[in-house]
Image (tube, rainbow, N blue to C red):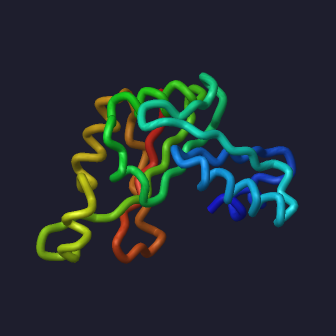
Amino acid sequence: FVVLVARAVSPGGRVIANDISKPFTDAIAKRAQAERLSNVSTVVGTDTDTGLAPASVDLVFTSDVYHHFTKVPQVLASIRAALRPGGRFIVVDFERIPGVTPPRMLEHVRAGKEVVTQEILAAGFRLREEVRSIPLKENYFLVFEKP
């Protein structure tokens, strides 16, 4: 999504690609350079800290990543700290519905939408909306906001 978002926020907007894997951020930086996207930078975080400066971003977007969070309260606190007041945290992740979701996904995905929502609300966010206008086959799309 980095290239798509970087083009959407140009001119003037910035995209910070954040991951705990330096090889992933290196690959993103290389792709951004090949695409001549000067508004993309990368930050390597940890499983507890995004590495983003306090109140430095308007939006945090995750896609099929949230279910990998192992230290949920710490990483959510880091995301919340990085967002400016009114900033949004978008979570697109896999549905986890017994009898509907394939067994391989039920085993892989740590928590379903209800648990994810509870965790994020407990971290001090408020649920702004669930986007249903985009047809997603196996995913949900939630938009939270930092008060």
Instruction: Measuring from the top left, give residue 32's x and y in whole percent.
Output: 77, 59
**Quadrant hosting residue 84:** top right
Q: Which residue is farthest front? A: 23
Toward which corner of the image does residue 132 lie, by quadrant? bottom left
> Is residue 1 found left or right of 127 in the rendered image?
right
Q: Observer-nearest residue: 28 or 131?
A: 28
List x then y, in percent, for residue 4.
70, 64
Q: Residue at x 44, y 75 (%)?
A: 135
Q: How many marks?
A: 0
Residue drawn at x 48%, y 70% is: 134
Which residue is nearer to you in this view: 110 or 141?
Answer: 110
Residue 144 picture location, percent across and down: 44, 42
Query: In the displayed structure, does residue 50 sit left or right of residue 108?
Result: right
Q: Residue at x 59, y 45 (%)?
A: 18
Q: Is residue 140 above or below residue 29?
A: below
Which of the pair 143/101 is nearer the observer? 101
Q: Which is more toward the observer, 35 or 57?
A: 35
Q: Position of residue 7 (x, y in %)?
A: 78, 60
Identity of the residue furthest to the left in this view: 99
Quadrant into which the N terminus falls: bottom right
